Amino acid sequence: MPCERKPMRYGHSEGHTDVCFDDEGKCVVTCGSDGDVRIWESLDDDDPKSINVGEKVYSVGLKNGKLVTAVSNNTIQIHTFPEGDPDGILTRFTTNANHVTFNSSGSRVAAGSSDFIVKIVEVVDSSQQKTLRGHDAPILSVALDPSDEFLASSSCDGSVAVWSIESQTQVAQWQILQKSSDVSNAKSLCRLAWQPRSGKLLAVPVDLTIQLYDRNTWTHVSTLSDDLISQVVNVVVWSPCGKFLAAGTVGGNLLVWDVEAKLCIERQKHEKGFTVCGMAWHPSGGRIAYTDTEGCLGLLEGVPSSSSTVQSTKVSPKETHDYDDLFDEDDDRGLDEGMSDSRSPVKKPIMEEDDDDDDLMPATGRPRNRGSFLDDDDNSQDPSCVKLDGVPEEDGSSAILPAVGPAVSRPVYEGPMPTQPQRAFQPGSTPVHLMHRFMVWNSVGIVRGYNDDQDNAIDVEFHDTAIHHAMHLTNTLGHTMADLSQEAVLLACEGTEELASKIQCLHFSCWDTHKDWIVDLPKGEDVRTLCLGQGWAAVATSALMVRLFSVGGVQKEIFSLPGAVVCMAGHGEQLLIVYHRGTGFDGDQALGIQLLQLGHKRRQVIHGEPLPLSRKSYLAWMGFTAEGTPCCIDSEGVVRMLNRTLGNMWTPVCNTRDSCKSKSDHYWVVGVHENPQQLRCIPCKGARYPPTLPRPAVAVLPFNLPYCQTTTEKGQMEEQYWRSVLFQNHYGFLSSSGYEIDSEGQSRAEKEQQELLMKMFALSCKLEREFRCVELAEIMTHSVVTLAIRYASRSRRMALAQRLSELALEKASQIQEEEQEEEEPAYQRLICSSFEEMKLLLNFVFQEYLINIFKLQVSGAGKSSSSPAGQPRTTNVLDSMTMSNRKPAPLGSTSKQGKAPVLKPLAPKPKSKVHCVAQIQMFSSPAGSHTLPKTGFQLWLEENRKSILADNPDFEEMDVIKEGMGRFRTLSAEERLNWTERAKGDSDPKKRKREDEEGQVDEQTESDEGRTKKKKPLDTSAKLSAFAFNKE
Amino acid sequence: MDPAEVEFLAEKEMVKIIPNFSLDKIYLIGGDLGPFNPGLPVEVPVWLALNLKQRQKCRIVPPEWMDTDKLEEIREQERKLDTFTPIPSLYYMELTKLLLNHSADNIPKADEIRTLVKDIWDTRVAKLRLSADSFISQQEAHAQLDNLTLMEINTTRSFLLDSLNYMYKLRSNLQPGRSQDY
């Protein structure tokens, strides 16, 4: 079962290192020759807590919140964990200790020093010490038996000894290691390890193998080796369950054996082949942390045997078992392991010991350090008995084991493990524990918090000094959260035992003299996160509530959230809330999101849908783009934006990690802009967060949608097109919510899109993908389709051109339909003017119609297609009408005038056409001699005239028609259609008549319907022939 | 050419600033600048950067090479080699002077940088003098010096040319017969 080797990361400066896990396995603790102990929350933790404990640290052990370190000033020190406060000196040697370790319960510490002495000290009372003398050389490693009976030690004198702690005498000794003069010369660190719980076996790294010694007889029972091992074994650690043994070698190999089967189940190689000098098994198994002599920290994930729980451990290692077997055995073993694992302090309950074979104590040790250990000489061990009171000690590795132990005792659960829910945070802030931190960095400004010895203060600075001058506030309340808008600064602190949680608002844009207000939250309710919008503030609290305030301090709505809040963001009238929707598993978070509109029409836009994040990541930033589109960024650096036109789905628009040069670099996002497309962020070298000093500079990243094959021209254009579409969505949103929009920018974006479509069209044409061409044409606007038709016919693809022209007609009819709705009010307006004028206007319109059609026939649609996308379509017929009204000689109209309408009348939809006709006839009839109602409206009007007159007896004819128009429009579509159907029968003659009257008779306009039908083919063929002509 | 002129030329170099005001693109004869967004770095010529800085309208982002580590490396290189090493900016001296005089508060470790640049300058000018000396003493007819900056050339130009002129006159007086060799 392959495990995953995570890439190494820098942990300490070069030199010897050691590693262990804390009891719960939440943190990895490392020490190094730089004298620091670092506490890593994960391998990706870019801001590990660093505790300086001395000049050099040789070994570290951690148990029950006590951190013991072997330091270069010859002492064993205790620090509290995780605070890192010094807690005294446990013991001293005449020279430095090389290895320090806890016993399984954490009550004792054992340390071996270069002055040949091993000491066992009670943690609570450092005066209770036992000293074991007998080795003739520096001690390499010590290990305390899980049952606190024995202590094993390895020394540079080439011996591995087992001591009875009670009598302080050696009970066994093996001369199995190579002698050396000092730890620095030893070939191996020879880290010993007792089998957890039972302590039946002692594992000793000897040369290229690991030898296991039995506890009862102190005899060698087995040897673990592997062909892969080319250099001596440095470190061995048992899995918390005691089933597996992991070893790290000088050559950088990492191996895991199933001890019972003597099977090497995992082989990994250090990525650079450096010497592994520290290893620790996670308390729950499953992963191994290791460090090398170059100061780097690495992690093996998914180590098969490692699970602390019995089941998991067994299951993974033994693939050969049936599931039933697995479970049975697992349980047994789990119990056993739990019991036998004396080192693990946590695991107290041992249910049963099934593994009796574990009695053997593995002891092998050949100390050869490549690492920077300090043991001294190569004296042979003295089997002299040293009486020690039971002093528990553990190696770094052993320390790990104890941690594992606790997990073991639990009932076995093998499924996905729940993820710790992420804490609430303010978007754009750096972690609270930093002394100098950004409380918020957004598009308005920066709020910095200082909390050091001299000062506890908050600095507010505005990017644009025109908003307000910079402010410096003393932070007497201890605010930890802040948000900043153009109007106000909102600060909040969590409550303490005496003081309630407070919200403070500096409303600097306020015009009266009281610029700030403070609100106390009810007792026991703490602010978790807050945000500011335009004229309002929102605060989410620990009581799963969101409280809204006006920016002046009036309390407004409160409402409950379905889960603990993660963060909030405000923009204009929009409020975005992210909360825990449930428990995530296997590193994933389960977040939900709500988007509320707080304006005059309050509503919820997103109703708590799940928020998509990358696998095993958490939310890192959440907010709005400058244009008001919600946007989120997860810890994997993926930026997602809400796509309002796609049912409020989230579209990934950028991955900031793609721009990072090294793995530990990050981009800390401070703002997203859609126009121009900018992702504003701060590059952080080797960290997730920027420092406040030197002042970081903002960089701009481009967006890049993860489309396929963006190296090809096609992929590139597709990406560009959809990016442009996505980033243009905000225009629609803004205009629908009544904001001003940059219409120039919008038309530019539209033009760009159409150009891209045309390019893609041309590309597909070149590749002879005609179907694809039509697909592309479907997304084009009507005017660009004509361009596409032209292109197709030029490249002699008549079939394609034919299809496209059909498409063009369809599109034209759609446009017509849309226009129809716009036209109606216009007509209404027109009714007010005299009918004579009306008639004149209509004449012009029809004239233009005909002229355009004529032009089409003669010269093709060339002109119209030449400036397709950018040309704003005249919105309705009336535009051209008014135009022609001013110039009563429409025949002389310029090509500019002709351009727009060319496309419009192409294929009027039957229904809308009829409607139009109806109106036209209505206008013309009073002027002409006709009294017969010929249109639906007229029919309807005849029938309803009386009722209108009855309602409004003083109406004139004009008013009646107006009123009638209004009423007619309120009828349902079917009804109106009905009327027009009824009118149809005798409409033809009438129309002809009208045209006669107008003196504009043309063959093509025999009747409106006839014209409509006729025009389609005419138009198409005209275009086609025009292109064919042009081609020559 | 006096140093002020060289400095004037250096003011055309581009430098990044972070404005604290908002302004659309401005169209100048030399090219378009901006748009200026508060908090967002933008490249402008040094003269504008300094002007804005003096009016407290921006912060100046020091050029990439204006960093103690990089300058130390250059200084070591400069000291090691006999020839002139390539310099990150042709106007390093002028820019250092201008930026440090006007916006030392925006440049981390300003004093160290000033010292380092001065060291580099001194080393280079010493080299220049040395090579001029050997040029004259060996009575060479021509010499090639790479990687010199305008300011460095300027410091030595008038003196070197004048002295060569005088020496030529003196020598031609002493050895009238050989004067045509020069």
Image (cartoon, coloured by chain):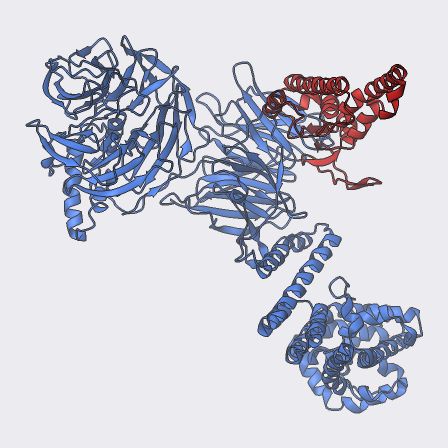
Chain colours: A blue, B red
Q: How many marks?
A: 0
- A919 lies above or below A33: below
Q: Quadrant of the C terminus of chain A?
A: bottom right
Is residue A930 visible to us here? no
A938 relative position to A80: left or right: right
- A249 lies above or below A90: below
Tell me where residue A572 appears, x and y as whole percent. Answer: 64, 43
Residue at left offset 58%, top offset 20%: A457
A655 relative position to A1027: left or right: left
Tell me where residue A936 appears, x and y as whole percent. Answer: 73, 82
Tell me where residue B165 appears, x and y as whole percent. Answer: 87, 20
- A975 lies above or below B76: below
Tell me where residue A313 appears, x and y as whole percent. Answer: 22, 42
Front residue of A836 and B14 = B14
Q: Residue furthest right?
A: A888
Q: Residue furthest front?
A: B177
Q: Quadrant of residue A468?
A: top right
A534 relative position to A937: left or right: left
Is residue A719 visible to us here? yes
Front residue of A237 and A997 = A237
